[in-house]
Amino acid sequence: MANWRSAIGWMVLGSGLLLAGCGGGGDAPPPASDARSDATAGAGAATEGPQVADVTAADTQPPTLVLNTPANLAANLTGRIDITADASDDVGIAGVEFQIDGALWGSDDTNPPYMTSITTTRLTTGQHVIRARARDTSNNRSAWVTRTVQFGNDVQVPEGFAKTALVGGLTGATAFAQAIDGRIFVTEQAGTVRVIKNGVLLPTPFATLPNVVSGGERGLVGITLHPNFATNGWVYVYYTTSEGGTHNRISRFTANGDVAAGPPTALFGLPTLTTTMHNGGAMHFGPDGKLYVGVGDNGLGAPAQDRNSLFGKLLRLNDDATIPTDNPYYATNTGNARAVWAIGLRNPFTFAVRPSDGRIHINDVGQNTWEEIDVGAAGANYGWPNSEGPDNITAGVTAPLFSYRHTAATPPGSAVGGFIIGRCIAGGAFYPVGGGFAALFPARFQGNYFFADFTTHEISRVDLANGNAVYAFAKTVGEPVDMRVATDGALLVLTRNNIVRIAPI
Ligand SMILES: [Ca+2]
C-alpha cells in the first residue's frame, strides 16, 4: 500500500506533498553520599520534642526547593543522569521526594546534598518529566519543581516491558476491534475484514465488501463491535463505496462464527466525496450505547464549521443508525445532519472512549503545524479550519487537551508539546484503572491516555493525573494506524501489516 504513505502525507499537508516525515522503580536508591543520617533523625525528633513546641508556634511555612540538575529542556540525555536539588526551610528539612514520569523514584533523600539518579536506557527514548519537592519537619511540602527533558539512546519500550508481533500478514490494515471472547477483527483498506483467533490470522476473511473505492485515504477504514456483540453478533464498518456516487457508508454485518452471515445492511450514508483526503472512519460505542463516528472534512476545510454539513465532525447515532433525539443539533438541524455531535475537526482518523465514564479523546490530524487531542463534548467546536492546535483559539472554540508540533521548536522542547514531535496522530487508547484484566500494567500507567503517531512510530502517554504531562512510552517499526487495550490488558498497536503487542514481561 505505497499509496497509503502518500495519502497520509496529504492528510498531513493537504497539498499532496510528502514530508519525511517507566517509571520502573528507579535506579538503586540514591547513594549514601554522606553519613549524616543522624542529623535528620535529630531534626525529626525535634518536631516532636518539647523544646520546639514550648517556644514556637506551629510551623506552617513550607520549605523551598531548587532543582539544580538536569536543566529544564536538557536534550538527548544519555548515560546516568544525576538529579540534584537544594532545599531550605525556616525550621528544618526532613527530606526530598523525586518523581520520574509522575511516579515516585526511590525513597526520600533525607540528607543533603539531595539527589537521585537514573540510567537513561531504563526508559524509552524521548520526553520524560522529572519532579522534586521538599518536605519539612512538620510535613509541609514545597511545590513540585519540574524539569522536562529528553532521553537519547534507542530504547523502544521501558524497562520491564516487551513488544512482540501478535500477528503479521495483514495487507493495508486500517482499524481493529476486539470481542470479549478475544477475537480481533481487522479491516484492510481494499475491503476485507479479517479475524484473528487464538493468535492466528484466519485465512478466510470474515467478509469482503463489494464496490469499495480504496485510493488515497478512501476504503474500508473503520470497524467496531456492538456492545452486545456476544449475543447479537453485530459488526459495524465504515467504508468508501462507489454505489450511488462515491461516498462513505456505515454498514452492519451479523457474525456467524468467524464469518459474516450474509451481506451487510447499509445503515447510514455520508455525503458524496470530492477528494480522496481526510476521510475519517473511526467508530466506537460509548457507555451510553450510542455509536460515535469520526468524519473527515473531505479536504475542504470550511464544511467543518458548518453545523449542517456532516464533514469534519464527530457524529452520534443509535445502534440502528437512527438519530438520538438528545443530540445537540437535533432540534435545529434536519435529516442526517441531526447526527452532528461535535464540529470543527479536520480528520478524526482515530478517537477513543474511556469505558468507565464515556470520556472521549479525539485525535485530530493536523495540517501545517500541529497534531491535537481534543476532549469530546456535545456541541463543542474544535476550531478547524480557523484554529489548529493551540493557535487561534477564539471565543466558542474548545482548545485541545494536548498538541504537538510537526517540527522541533527552537530550542527543542520549548514550545507546546515539548519534545513530542510528529505529523499524523493515529491511534489512541485509555488504559483502565484497577483490577481485572486491566491490572497488567503497573499502577503508574493506569488511567493514562496512550496515543501514537503514524510518521514517527512513537507511542506517548498522557498522565491525566499529573497536569496532562506527556511521556515517551514505546516505538514500533511499522506505521501505527490504530491502538487499543486488549482484553488481557496488553496494549495492541495496529500497523499497516501487523499487530504489535506491548506488555510487561
Ligand atoms: Ca517550615
Image (cartoon, rainbow, N blue to C red):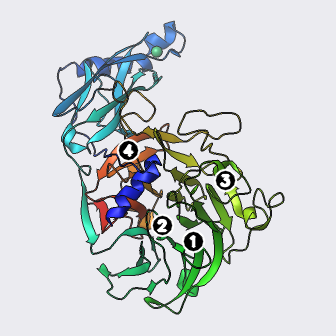
If you read the primary sequence from the N terminus, does the residue marked by circle 2 or circle 1 appear first? 2
| Front residue of this view, candidates 434 and 8 | 8
Q: Please state which amino acid type lies under the numbered disc 3.
A: Ala
Q: Secondary structure at mark 4?
A: loop
Q: Which mark is residue 246?
A: 1
- What residue sits right under mark 4 in the picture? 422
For the C terminus, which image quadrant?
bottom left
| Front residue of this view, candidates 378 and 330 | 330
If you read the primary sequence from the N terminus, does the residue marked by circle 4 or circle 1 appear first? 1
Left or right, residue 71 beside residue 190: left
Q: Please state which amino acid type lies under the numbered disc 4.
A: Gly
Q: Which mark lies nearer to you, 4 or 1?
A: 1
Residue 205 visible in the displayed image: yes
Residue 290 image point, x, y percent: 66, 68
Could you give the CA–CA distance between mark 3 and mark 2, rounded to whole angstroms?
A: 22 Å
Do residues under tags 2 and 1 come within 8 Å of each other at their CB atoms?
yes
Could you give the CA–CA distance between mark 4 and mark 1, rounded to whole angstroms?
A: 31 Å
Could you give the CA–CA distance between mark 2 and mark 1, rounded to whole angstroms?
A: 10 Å
Left or right, residue 210 beside residue 101: right
| Front residue of this view, candidates 223 and 89 | 223
- What residue sits right under mark 2 in the picture? 218
Residue 446 visible in the displayed image: no
Q: Please state which amino acid type lies under the numbered disc 2.
A: Arg
Q: Residue at x 57, y 60 (%)?
A: 356
- What residue sits right under mark 3 in the picture? 342
